[in-house]
Amino acid sequence: MKKIQCSFSSVKMDGETVTKLSLQGDLTIQNLEEVKNQVVEAVKHCERMEVVVRNVEGLDLACIQLFFSMRETFARSNRKINFDIDLPDEIKSIVEHAGFIDLPKMLEVS
């Protein structure tokens, strides 16, 4: 598996800074430390975040936990975060069998 690829971009929309986080590759605990550090720094400086997950080769509970932590961090500070997650069928099946039937829906901030 190839390592995780992580990129950020920011734009101003409707007076807010929107940070787009794009993730792809092997989203497992072996690769998440560097992403977590970048995410923690980005979260401090943005008003709204769009997380786009594509071309996933691996996904484990550590990554899912990071997503839920991001959601809670944004919810506590009344900021918006959206997740756009597209998983291959094989990984989607594993995630659903682990109890995360509709992961993007579960990650919505209510």
Image: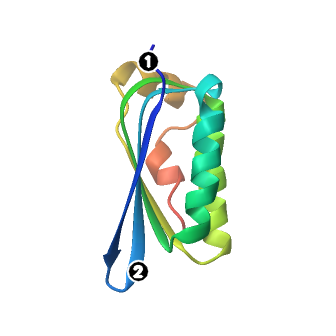
> Can you name the residue that lies furthest to the top here?
1
Q: Residues within 10 Å of mark 2 (few under 14, many from 20)?
A: few
The residue that mark 2 highlights is 16
Name above or below for residue 104 compared with residue 99.
below
Q: Nearer the viewer, residue 64 or 42?
A: 42
Q: Nearer the viewer, residue 40 or 52?
A: 40
The residue that mark 1 highlights is 2
Name above or below for residue 45 compared with residue 71.
below
Residue 72, x across and y down, in percent: 66, 61
Q: How is the image coloured?
A: rainbow
Counting labels gives: 2
Q: Quarter holding the C terminus?
A: bottom right
Classify mark 1: helix, strand or loop: loop
Question: Residue at the spot x=50%, y=74% of the render?
Answer: 47
Distance CA(mark 1)–CA(mark 2): 34 Å
Residue 15, x across and y down, in percent: 37, 86
Question: Residue at the spot x=64%, y=31% of the render?
Answer: 61
Q: Residues within 10 Å of mark 1 (few under 14, many from 20)?
A: few
